[in-house]
Amino acid sequence: MQTKAESSSSSDVTLPTDFQLRAHYISNSIPFVGFGIVDQTVMIQAGNAIDCTLGVTFGLSTLSAAAVGGLISNVSGILCGGTLENFAKKAGLPNSNLTAAQRNLPFVKRNRLLSQAAGVLFGCTLGLVNLLFIDTERSSHLKLQQLSEDNEFAFEVEANNDDPDSTELIVRGPDNDGLLASVTASLSLGGYSILDVSAHKLKDGSIEDKFRVVVQGTKKRVDDDDLRKVSELVLDATKENALLLKAQVSELESLNEQLQQRVEHLESVLVKRRVTIRKSL
């Protein structure tokens, strides 16, 4: 009975004209175009700023920075919603002049929903233009640079002669690629033979590498007076590993510049190949 009553009441409503539907579509979509532009712009700019500042300082991932940027953009969209609607009204958008009963018609509601969705989609697409004006690789370079600077002073070395036949060296610090090889090479070049190596990863993510070494010539443990010397040798090896990270950052930046120049060159070559000029005789 209720369905029949609704259908009969809907049939009594005058159907909107095509002009009214178009006006209804435009008046609902334009404000959401502005909303999409604002939302996308704030998210990209805020996310990039957070990634290059807090992300570098506290080690946040790019995805975390983007999530915070999305949070800020959503709040900004709500705060700017009324302003965008008022601006759209002052812009002279066509008025559909639909009655309340016409607005409640199912296909009119769908018209409104589709117009808003299309407006947001178009606005967010336009907002992607922001990516052309920011350096998307800057945060990665800053994080690598921060990592190398932090690692330079993040290691500690302990040396002891508790074993009567060998000297134990304990290295504690962040888990960096190439650290074990760097320390091993430094000890060998420094005149020490490595009898045993063990690597342990601690609960906080750092590592604890243990080396049992003897002097190459005598095959005996390091003298107590030379423990500081061998400890400083190992500590210098950890700094060399940090310098290697800095070198990798510099190499990546140089490679990026070379790739950009290569792309520009290829684009110019393609343009020349597509243009044919025949001079008159």
Image (tube, grey):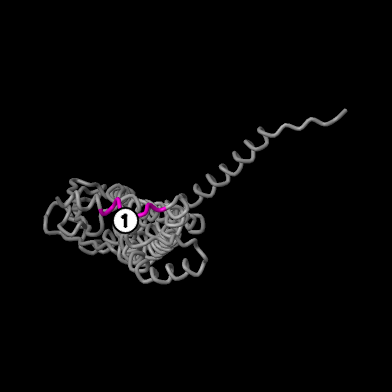
**Can residue 10 be found in the magenta stretch?**
yes
Residue 138 visible in the snapshot:
no
Is 13 in front, or is 211?
13
Q: Which residues are magenta?
A: 9-16
Which residue is at a point 37% across and 52% down the rendered structure image?
15
- What residue type is disc 1 on? Leu
- The part of the image, by quadrant, that contains residue 105 is bottom left
In the figure, 279 relative to 36: above or below?
A: above
Where is residue 228, by image quadrant?
A: bottom left
Relative horizontal placement of residue 174, taking residue 149 as reference (left or right): left
Closer to us: 42 or 199: 42
Of 187 and 113, nearer the camera is: 113
User: Label 1: few (<14), some or many (≥20) within 10 Å?
Assistant: few
Where residue 274 sits, quadrant-wise, is: top right
Q: Residue furthest left?
A: 163
Task: Decide whether the magenta segment is chiefly helix, strand or loop.
Answer: loop
**Residue 29 among magenta residues:** no
Dot 1: element: helix
Eyeballing the image, is 82 above or below 44?
A: below
Residue at label 1? Answer: 63
Return the x and y of residue 64 as percentages of the image width and height. Answer: 30, 59
**Measured from the top left, where is residue 6 in percent x and y?**
22, 53
